[in-house]
Structures are given as structure tokens and as C-alpha cells.
């Protein structure tokens, strides 16, 4: 197991999640779900800017160089990057105040998969939704903590997890629509004693990079589900990786302080966003298709 390289952002998040690069702007965006912040920082350094949000949001996706899509507790919002103004695009579980959004990724065709869960991780109340060109469909229900949503570069397969079950599934997808086809199958099973699968991203060579919540590790899995690498991280509750850099060749990982004793000394880097000492053949998230 090799170690981590450094801290990308030293400002701690209560629940850092959803990192996604905006290559046109040369910036990484990520969310503090429970803190209700959208964070941004240039790839090559500088200060981190925190934007206050009126809702808990967990996913940020590119629409274009002026607009982002936020996946939030009551729906999908369009965000003007210049002014920060939000406009509700599509309500989602707006009639369920007990739930919020969680993990999500954009399929190569431009469809968004977005997970929801109970605000107190109530068993089985979460779902995963598909959004594409204004249409929303329910894909999976009965999930406690949806995570590890990621897509192969050619758009023919997806992964997703229920962190509570410790299971990452894999399923074939239609490359034109991002809709699942066929039946899901178990891809990875993580014993509870080793932590739980959290956010993930798939590189251009087909490796799934998964943050292991409670395990202080970023793990890489081959297309057959074999764990081929584990990188020790300086926080136990790492949450989600993303590719940054001019060539999408650098990994960063968010983390969380949620539920930790603030006086802990053995997890003093909790909540920070980390840079990872590996060069990868990554790829940037596609733009999300809203029309």
C-alpha cells in the first residue's frame, strides 16, 4: 500500500462529496453536503472559494462554460457560474423532506445518474434516478446509501453501490441513452470490517477508483473486479475521487468529518481534499444534456 501525496484543499468539509473538474475553467468543484457549500479551486493551486447554497447539494455537473447543474435535496438546479444564481430545473423528491441527494455521475452520452437517501441513512429509502434532456426516470429503489456511480469510457457499462450493503454492482448500459440494460451483477463486495464503498470514477483504461469510507483508502479495481491497488489516505472517511489537471492525469479525493469527535488527534486531516501521488489516464466528466 502506497501513501498519499498532499493536501489539495486544507479547508475541512463536514461531508465533502461530488468532486468534478471543469476543464474549460481549469477548476475543480466539489460540495460540502451538510455544510451547504459549493467549493471551487484552480487545478494548479491558489485559494479555495466557498459559495453558500440554500439547499443541501451533492453533485455538480457541467452544462457549458457559463452554467452548471446541481443535484440537490429537492431537485436539479441550474447555476449561473458568474453570478451564482440558482434556478430550479426539475423537482426531485421535493415532496420527501426526509431525503436528500447523494452520489451521481454523468454518462458519456450526457445522461445524469443521481442517487437519493434518507437524511439519517434510513434503511432502503434511497433510489437512483436517470435524467436526460429534461426527462427523469427511476432506475433503482430500496437503496440505503447510493454511491460508486461511474461509467466506462465507451458508455456500455455502469457501476453503483449501496454503501450499507458493502456492495458495488455492475450493469450494462445503452451507450446512446445511459439507460441500464440487462441485470446487475455483483462487481465488488467489501467486508464491513474493511469499510464501505463510497464515490468512484473510472479511468480511460477501465480501472475503477473507489474511495473506501472508514477504510482510509483509495482502491483501484480491474474490469473483472480484482483489487489491483490500494493507496493509503490520511483520513478514514474518504468519500469520492475525481480527475484534474490539464490532461486529467491527477487524482484528488474528498473526505468528511461527519460523526467524528472534533477532539480526535488520530484523524486530524478529516474533511480535507487530497491530491494522490499517481499518474493516471483519466478523463473529464462529460457535459450533462439538459435539452
Image (spheres, grey):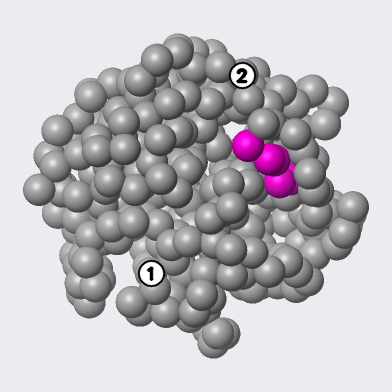
**Residue closer to the observer: 231 or 224:** 224
The secondary structure type at the circle numbered 1 is strand
Asked if residue 50 shows in the view, the reply is: no
Q: Which residue is mark 2?
A: 186
Residue 233, x across and y down, in percent: 79, 56
Side of 80 relative to 40 (left or right): left
Residue 219, image x and y in percent?
73, 45
Judge left or right: residue 227 versus residue 239.
Answer: right
Mark 2 residue crowding within 10 angstroms, few (<14) / some (14–19) / many (20+): some
Viewer-nearest of labels 2 and 1?
2
Q: Which residue is located at x 24 percent, y 35 percent?
A: 177
Residue 285 painted magenta: no
> Which residue position is annotated with label 1?
22
Range of residues picked out in magenta: 219-223
Please tell me which of labels 2 and 1 falls first in the chain: 1
| Residue at 14% over, 33% down | 135
Residue 221 falls in image quadrant: top right
Amino acid at each position: 500500500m502506497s501513501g498519499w501525496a498532499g493536501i489539495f484543499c486544507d479547508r475541512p468539509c463536514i461531508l465533502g462529496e461530488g468532486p468534478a473538474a471543469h476543464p474549460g475553467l481549469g477548476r475543480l468543484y466539489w460540495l460540502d453536503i451538510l455544510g451547504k457549500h459549493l467549493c471551487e479551486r484552480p487545478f494548479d493551486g491558489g485559494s479555495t472559494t466557498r459559495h453558500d447554497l440554500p439547499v443541501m447539494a451533492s453533485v455538480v455537473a457541467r452544462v457549458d462554460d457559463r452554467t452548471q447543474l446541481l443535484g440537490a435535496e429537492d431537485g436539479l438546479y441550474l447555476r449561473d457560474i458568474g453570478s451564482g444564481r440558482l434556478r430550479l430545473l426539475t423537482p426531485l423528491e421535493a415532496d420527501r423532506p426526509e431525503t436528500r441527494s447523494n452520489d451521481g455521475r454523468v454518462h458519456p452520452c450526457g445522461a445524469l445518474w443521481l442517487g437519493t437517501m434518507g437524511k439519517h441513512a434510513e434503511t432502503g429509502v434511497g433510489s437512483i434516478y436517470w435524467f436526460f434532456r429534461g426527462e427523469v426516470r427511476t432506475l433503482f429503489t430500496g437503496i440505503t446509501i447510493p454511491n460508486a456511480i461511474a461509467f466506462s469510457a465507451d458508455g456500455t457499462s455502469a457501476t453503483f453501490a449501496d454503501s450499507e450493503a458493502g456492495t458495488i454492482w455492475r450493469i450494462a448500459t445503452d451507450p446512446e441513452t445511459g439507460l441500464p440494460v440487462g441485470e446487475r451483477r455483483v462487481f465488488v463486495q467489501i467486508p464491513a470490517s474493511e469499510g464501505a464503498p463510497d464515490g468512484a470514477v473510472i479511468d480511460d483504461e477501465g480501472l475503477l477508483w473507489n474511495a473506501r469510507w472508514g477504510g482510509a483508502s483509495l482502491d483501484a479495481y480491474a474490469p473483472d473486479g480484482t483489487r489491483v491497488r490500494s493507496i493509503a489516505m490520511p483520513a478514514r472517511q474518504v468519500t469520492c475521487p475525481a480527475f484534474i489537471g490539464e490532461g486529467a492525469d491527477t487524482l484528488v479525493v474528498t473526505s468528511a468529518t461527519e460523526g467524528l469527535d472534533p477532539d480526535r488527534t488520530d484523524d486530524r486531516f478529516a474533511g480535507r481534499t487530497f491530491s494522490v501521488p499517481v499518474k493516471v489516464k483519466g478523463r473529464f466528466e462529460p457535459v450533462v444534456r439538459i435539452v
